[in-house]
Amino acid sequence: MLSVIIVTYNSSAHIAACLDALKDKAAEVVVVDNASSDGTAELVRKSYPPVKLIACETNLGFAAGANLGARRSAAEFLLFLNPDTACLDLLDPLEEALASSRQAAAVAPRLVAEDGQTQLGFTVRRLPSVWFLVFEMLLLNRLFPRNPINRKYRCLDLDLAHPSEVEQPAGACLLVRRDRFEACGGFDEAFYPLWFEDIDLCKRLREHGGTILFLPHVRVQHRGAHSLESVTFAEKQIYWYRNMLYYGKKHFPRGSGVVLRGALLAGMGLRAAAELLRSPAQSQIPPRSERLRAYWNAAKLSFAKIRSATGERVVTPRLPSSTEGGWLGEK
């Protein structure tokens, strides 16, 4: 039996399509709603009575919500699924791949956009190295997207037509063996509210001797960026870079933090300079003043203390009131 775990936050516009695509699947479906204010929990409760709904009073973040769903489920295999996805093919091959190999810790399908095109550079990646992240922060991947570092990181050199063993498929749809998931401690809830928690899980699954498989003939449609609709520009900077530094502290050699923090500081400087050089006629949302303030807040993370205890929530710097928004619980 399969347990499908969906963590939602203001997902009322997407959750119906996600659940409808699962209606013919003999699976336990658990929805963990992170205190949505748009009626997501009410929609699930009213329209999908077979679904096990866990309506949280506060936003736990994606990792904690997913862990809660796993604890309240019963199956041997756990399918972590984003609410902005819809399964286009039968999921049986994913289950069969896990069942046929005790070494396999997780398996993922191919993610496709609404037009059916593979989400290249996202559906599967390699685990990030220090240099992958440095190139990202210094805008080198954006300016030169075909550079060898970026091609390797985003698996642009990988033949996606055939099944293969991979390092880090996207967490938007990931089937994990329960015993492997529990043995490595589940999702690290310190990656709050989102970003890097799926990368960290894949790394620990592999460190515990498991392999991760990619089955491209199983397709799952993924809208993408749904979770970011409730997050301000300033919050995105804080959350991504704070969790990036925490990931580096957990997994990279001593001294790598200096490199990452230096690249973060330089990267924010480059972004601020580009913003100042931009013509006033090139309108931006949010406006220039808010973007510059967001870059400054992110740059201050270079000097912040990032605690490294696995599972310990790491407090993010408080954002100015003008840029505060809702906490996010769905990746």
Image: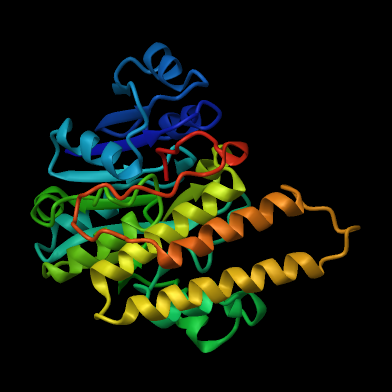
Give whichever of 156, 1 is nearer the camera. 156
**47 is higher (above) or lower (below) than 264:** above
Give whichever of 250, 319 is nearer the camera. 319
Query: Residue 52: x and y, percent?
Result: 26, 22
Instruction: Specify whether residue 155 is in view.
Output: no
Residue at position x 45%, y 25% in the image: 36
**Image quadrant assignment for residue 301:** bottom left
Q: In the rendered image, which quarter contains the N terminus?
A: top left
**Image quadrant assignment for residue 127:** bottom left
Instruction: Specify whether residue 78 is in view.
Output: yes
Residue at position x 40%, y 24% in the image: 35
**216 is higher (above) or lower (below) than 35:** below
Query: Residue 128: x and y, percent?
Result: 37, 74
**319 is higher (above) or lower (below) than 305:** above
**242 is higher (above) or lower (below) than 311:** below
Please give left or right for residue 208 compared with residue 57 in the image: left
Residue at position x 28%, y 69% in the image: 249
Give whichever of 94, 147 is nearer the camera. 147
Query: Residue 105: x and y, percent?
Result: 17, 60
Give whichever of 94, 79 is nearer the camera. 79
